[in-house]
Image (tube, rainbow, N blue to C red):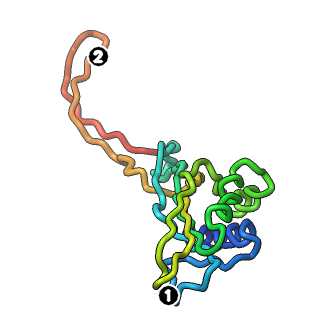
Amino acid sequence: MIDIELFKTELYNWALTLSGGEECYYVNDNGPKPDSPAISMQILSMPTINHPHKGAPDNAGLRSITREAKLWLKLDTYGANAIGRLSPFVIANYIEPASEPLRASTGLSMVNNTDILDITGLNDIDNEERATVNIMFNFGDRSDNIDSGLIENVEGIGTYKDPEGNETNRNFLINTP
């Protein structure tokens, strides 16, 4: 089962660490935007399921499903050196100590990112440096005890041929153990 609240909490902690303790917040949270410098966070998509592996059903017709999923996180920085402040997030993919705590706590593994884009714009009447990047994470998910829709009983009529070649129509019933 995917725990989105765990992901949000751990991604927040990861961002706080990589930013050196800079103000981080989710854009969907209620409240005013913090003063710059700050980093806004938004989970853009969650999850895209790819190539599920379905285990064989047990006698009760229940199975496990394991799948790979993707999550996109958008980070925006506001204030001086906005582009430079996003660099640690992009290079975290290549530095084990920066990515390992997130992987250990959630299974999220950073796999790709967009370029860091300059989106500087007006904040009231003043120009405010801004930058944005989207980061893609992969993770595995497993769900147990999923009803497989297993057929428990089959009834039918078939033709039976005995060793002497005599044919007879018979009713049959097949049950799962």
Task: Depth check: give the residue in front, 136 or 47.
Answer: 136
Distance CA(mark 2)–CA(mark 1): 77 Å
**Mark 1 or mark 2, which is nearer the start of the sequence?**
1
Say if 69 sits above or below 9 in the image: above
Badge 1 crowding class, 10 Å Cα cut-off, few under 14, some 14 to 19, many 20 or more, is few
Residue under label 1? 30
Give the image location of residue 62, x and y in percent. Answer: 48, 53
Mark 2: secondary structure: loop
- Which residue type carries mark 2? Asp
* In this rendering, position of residue 21 left or right of residue 118: right
Residue pushed farthest right?
Answer: 97
Task: Depth check: give the residue in front, 33 or 79.
Answer: 79
- Please say whether residue 64 is visible from this viewpoint: no
Residue under label 2? 162
Which residue corresponds to the image point at 53% horizontal and 58% vertical from the top-left? 117
Badge 2 crowding class, 10 Å Cα cut-off, few under 14, some 14 to 19, many 20 or more, is few
Give the image location of residue 130, x and y in percent. Answer: 55, 69
Give the image location of residue 159, x and y in percent. Answer: 22, 24
* In this rendering, position of residue 79 left or right of residue 143: right
- Which residue type carries mark 1? Asn
Which residue corresponds to the image point at 71% horizontal and 55% vertical from the top-left? 92
Say if 1 sits above or below 113 in the image: below
